[in-house]
């Protein structure tokens, strides 16, 4: 998957907090201060972990995929599935998926080791074969794992931790109170009063993400998910039912390079990259619609193929 460089997409922009944001660092052990502080960097400034953004994005994309076909996304609550769909289906090797990908993976490893017993020192060949076999299992199943990764497949999509834009944050957090209500008395339950920190609305964070070696339909899947952030349809952090965590992504630049099957172009790209030449990349804005069309076509083919195989 990553043994040969094919393409790269860099996305930069700003993530704006429309309402206050609460991404908690867990309960504080300090005798003074708030009960639930927000995550901060080494300088005490608010921070949004890249994993929080990526997790919310993947969850929304998976919900869309399940709405199209339940086999297009795994059930994350079932550990044995390990990024494979919940229904019992046979893979290309005739195995029943429900027994767990970890078991299938072990069987594949045993077969490859036996096949390459006279070439045990060729680790690269072993890893390549293993990846190929696992990809065959996932190819027509959990589509989100192609982009976001799984326990067996590395992620093509990387999100940096989102750091605060200095001139949008004035060094202050808001303190808010929380309380659990006794349903019988409709009053505050004893010992259930607490306070928590939030990042004020209007704070902006630097956003940067990178995608490498992605197929056009995978990029379309990403564009569909990012559009949800651009239109304030995905919330982050805790307290979302109270109105917290509404954010808006403003994409400022998308830089794209595709060098597949062109060694000369790859050499030119590397030379420009080292020299700091911005023409090493091209603007990817015009490709968004094309990638989304590629995604729709891919999903339609998957659905048609499934229907044709249904007795």
Image (tube, rainbow, N blue to C red):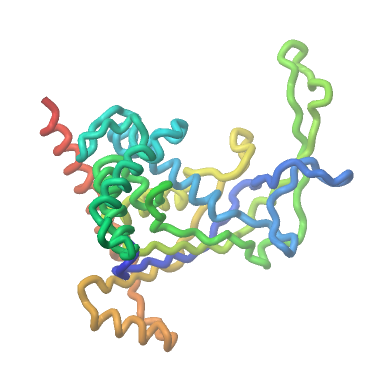
Q: Nearer the viewer, residue 152 or 227?
A: 152
- Taking the image as shown, residue 59 lies to the left or right of residue 112, namely right
Q: Nearer the viewer, residue 297 or 228?
A: 297
Residue 278 position (above or below residue 41): below
- Taking the image as shown, residue 225 lies to the left or right of residue 215, namely right
Q: Residue 33 location in percent, x, y? A: 84, 46
* Residue plotted at (38% across, 40% down): 102
Q: Residue 216 location in percent, x, y? A: 26, 58
Q: Quadrant of residue 310?
A: top left
Residue 190 position (above or below residue 17): above
* Residue plotted at (68% across, 45% down): 24
Q: Quadrant of residue 104?
A: top left
Q: Quadrant of residue 190?
A: top right
Q: Residue 74 location in percent, x, y? A: 37, 36
* Residue plotted at (49% across, 44% down): 234
Q: Quadrant of the N terminus?
A: bottom left
* Residue plotted at (21% across, 35% down): 94
């Amino acid at each position: 998957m990553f043994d040969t460089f094919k393409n790269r997409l860099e996305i930069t922009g700003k993530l704006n907090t429309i309402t206050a944001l609460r991404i908690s660092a867990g309960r504080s052990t300090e005798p003074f201060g708030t009960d639930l502080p927000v995550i901060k960097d080494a300088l005490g400034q608010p921070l949004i972990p890249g994993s929080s953004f990526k997790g919310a994005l993947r969850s929304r994309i998976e919900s869309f995929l399940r709405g199209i076909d339940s086999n297009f996304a795994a059930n994350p609550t079932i550990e044995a599935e390990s990024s494979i769909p919940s229904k019992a289906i046979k893979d290309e090797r005739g195995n029943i998926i429900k027994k767990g990908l970890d078991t299938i993976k072990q069987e594949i490893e045993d077969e490859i080791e036996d096949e390459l017993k006279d070439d045990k020192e060729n680790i690269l060949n072993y890893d390549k074969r293993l990846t190929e076999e696992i990809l065959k299992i996932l190819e027509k199943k959990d589509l989100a794992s192609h982009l976001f990764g799984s326990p067996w497949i590395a992620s093509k999509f990387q999100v940096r931790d989102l750091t605060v834009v200095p001139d949008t944050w004035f060094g202050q957090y808001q303190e808010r109170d929380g309380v659990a209500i006794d349903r019988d008395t409709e009053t505050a339950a004893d010992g259930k009063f607490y306070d928590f920190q939030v990042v004020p609305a209007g704070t902006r964070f630097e956003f940067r993400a990178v995608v490498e070696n992605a197929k056009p339909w995978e990029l379309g899947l990403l564009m569909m998910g990012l559009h949800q952030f651009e239109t304030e349809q995905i919330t982050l952090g805790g307290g979302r039912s109270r109105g917290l965590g509404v954010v808006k992504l403003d994409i400022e630049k998308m830089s794209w390079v595709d060098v597949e099957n062109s060694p000369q172009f790859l050499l030119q790209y590397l030379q420009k990259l080292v020299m700091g030449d911005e023409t090493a990349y091209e603007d990817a804005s015009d490709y968004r619609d094309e990638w989304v069309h590629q995604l729709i076509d891919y999903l339609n083919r998957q659905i048609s193929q499934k229907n044709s195989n249904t007795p």
